[in-house]
Amino acid sequence: MGSADVVRDGPAKAFMLCNEAIVRGAIEADVKVVSAYPGSPTTEILDTFSDVKPNFDYKMEISSNEKVALETCAGAAMVGHRSISSMKSVGMNVASDSFFSLSYTGVKAGMVIVMADDPQAHSSQTEQDGRAFGPNAYVPMLEPSDPAEAKKMVKRAFELSEKYGVPVLMRTTTRVNHQSGIVELEKIDRKPFEKLDWSHAPARFTTVADTARRFKLQLLERTKQLEEEFNSSDLNLVKDTGSEIGIVTSGAGYNYAVDAARILGINPSILKLGTTFPLPRKLIGDFIKKVKTVIIVEELSPYLELHVTAIAKDANPSVKILGKWTGHFSEAFEYNPNIVVDAFAKALGLKAPVDYEAMMAKADELKKGLSDRPPTFCPGCPHRATLWALLQATKGTKHILSTDIGCYSMSFLQPLNYGDSMLSMGACMGVAAGMQYAAKEKVVAMVGDSTFYHAALPGLVNAIHHNDDFTLIILDNEVTAMTGQQPNPGSDYNAGGQPAKKMVLEDVIRGMGITDITIIDPYQAKAVVQPIKEALSRKGPNIIISRRACALYADRNKRRRGEAILSNKVDKEVCKKPYTCIRSFNCPAISIDDDDRKATISKELCDRCDVCAKLCPFGSIKLREGE
Amino acid sequence: MTSDEFSIYMSGVGGQGLVLLSNVIGSACASAGIRALTGEQHGLSQRSGSINIHMRIGEQIRSPLIPVAGADAILALEALEALRYVEHLKPGGVVVMNKRIQHPIIETIGHMKDKTAKYMSVEDVKARLSEVTDKIAVIDALAIAKQAGNALTENIVMLGALSTLEAFPVPEEALKKSISENVPKKAIEVNLKAFDLGKKAAFETLCNIVKCKK
């Protein structure tokens, strides 16, 4: 798999996830400082850097949030070491405050920020188009289409960053980050890590008022030079087939455009933009001069379409530009080959070789009655137990649940459909503060340990200072579970297994002035209902900490230690089919035996948290024999 | 589309080892000089949810996603998940599916409320799929994996079965080498055994209906 290939010396070929290829590129570029907070679809960048860290001498932090991560990289690059951070685009929202300033102050050594959008919102709260960050901050932006190109581009990004003294943004999307492909490994030639002298004039990286105005003029000049360079850069690809039809595209769109053209048997000219800020306007102008029709293939907002349209005004006023504004493509959701085939067919009056709509209709008919399988809490997940107990404790009373970002967000999905609001990392507390002013009902806020440290701390400071009346439940499962169980400030280790100071939640909270803290173990099931009830009945702000390790994490540790993962079974002699285990617990390890309609537990899936056994009124759930 | 191309729509339930499976195939391709790419699913959907990986082999393919009606084969580690992505199968394409069903919890909840309800079965899935193809093989991967010595090797059992297809362009030696490089050291032997047992199972089922390697 990837990690072994990431450390393997080149020249060689390897099959790599794009996120691993990005890491490999940065290592070949002799990156010295890495800092990031996990977030899909970038998480494997952080994971890979962490996995291979023992092989290299770069410094690395799995940061408390994206803003701190970006600032850590900025500091290192100011001194003179190459640095890289990765984040999903909503993470860039968090980091953006410093990001904008950093464009003004610039950096000394190369600094690269990988920022990934998530069209289709597979694992995100919005379909935000992060491309706006490049032009808005005047930060150069590159977009790769596949792992091989991403690796090449990250190395070029470091060079550009150093040449122009500005961080470089590498913008990706889910279908680029989570694409694997064949990558050329080059020689790894790294210099030993050493501390450097601070060699700058005072206030070199300070921006406000007069210096900000000076920096602004400099960055405009810098952007002009970058555009000049990009006009003839091999980061942009022009395929001139002499066709009257031209495709302008970038990133994931390019992959679909090439395949769609092949499927339709057409051979249009293609301009694949690798530099999407500043846009190479001369290159684009020259391209559209040679064609009669331009089709723009880009996901999310019509960013390229807007600029191509503006450039066409002088370059080729009569060119037909087809894209989102003409209804050929949507601004919603991610693309795929058939969407692009259909759009090309419509634009060019061709017929798609497959009637996709008919195929989908036939498939829908065949799938009638097939149950959905949305993501849900894993067997053994402590969140399921906490939510069960919370629902019991609040039975018959009205309350509002202001929840946050993490695995527990899934409580709003089927079958629980529980939770009233969820905006962004750490938002549960600010939202709860407003709710407790406006609503008659009791307000409950819920956040995981990692999200608590990420962005909820200022919310808690605010709530304590203003004596806001809500109860905060912190789900402490030891790790950043959602993204793959990375360590967080509550862990005693960090990237690459290096030792770290473990923060203790209740100590942090007590230090902030709250003494009403209830700590529960959700696996105790019924026993924790009353303590929750009592905590909720008291005036806030008060805290419930529900503490139990993420089941996936605990299982991994058990396997590492060679411990068996036990499972429960249903004693069919005792089961009287109350279905309590299904009705109120919703564990995917439990199903109904079609022969006798009694509950049955999958040995392969059960994690033996034993909570369902504690809930069964007949005591029919027991440890599987022989375990 | 050229004849060296082969696209496999791989599906299953989060936690079944689909990513490892695509890594094994992809690394085997890299060592055998065959171009391969995938579109994978990581993140939220892994939590016991439906999961899919698009595995694409071919010199000219660029899209990591297989178009509708573009998959030469569906490889399903769970039977319901074979049906869920049926639109991606080329008419007459091959389906290699695990006999195992993991009932989605929301299906179980509906089931609890309706006493006459029956879960969708492997036979139901097969009957429905047979409307678009007659090349369906059901492999009891869990039983075979246990026979190999570890229930977690279901994914490699299924790969062993798939590898018998004549049209599957990855040589067996490359796959076996890749398995050895991609699974934990102490699990290499059991995985190679799972691969061979999967192949054997395919020769008894799949190869009666589709052209297989000798």
Image (spheres, coloured by chain):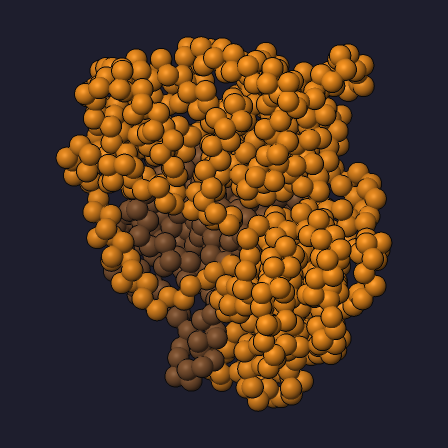
The foreground one among A10 and A296 is A296
Q: Is residue A404 above or below residue A272?
A: below
**Image point 57% across, 46% down: which residue?**
B192
Q: Horizontal placement of A516 versus B69: left or right?
A: right
Chain letter for the brown part: B
The foreground one among B169 and A19 is A19
Residue A243 visible in the displayed image: yes
Relative image position of residue A601 (x, y in whole percent): 58, 73
Q: Chain A, which colour?
A: orange
**Image point 59% across, 28% down: which residue?**
A100
Relative image position of residue B14 (x, y in whole percent): 53, 55
Looking at the figure, which quarter contains the N terminus of chain A? top right
Q: Horizontal placement of B6 versus A552: left or right?
A: left
Residue A256: name its quadrant: top left
Q: Is residue B122 above or below residue A431?
A: below
The foreground one among A541 and A168 is A541
**Image point 70% across, 62% down: which residue?**
A468
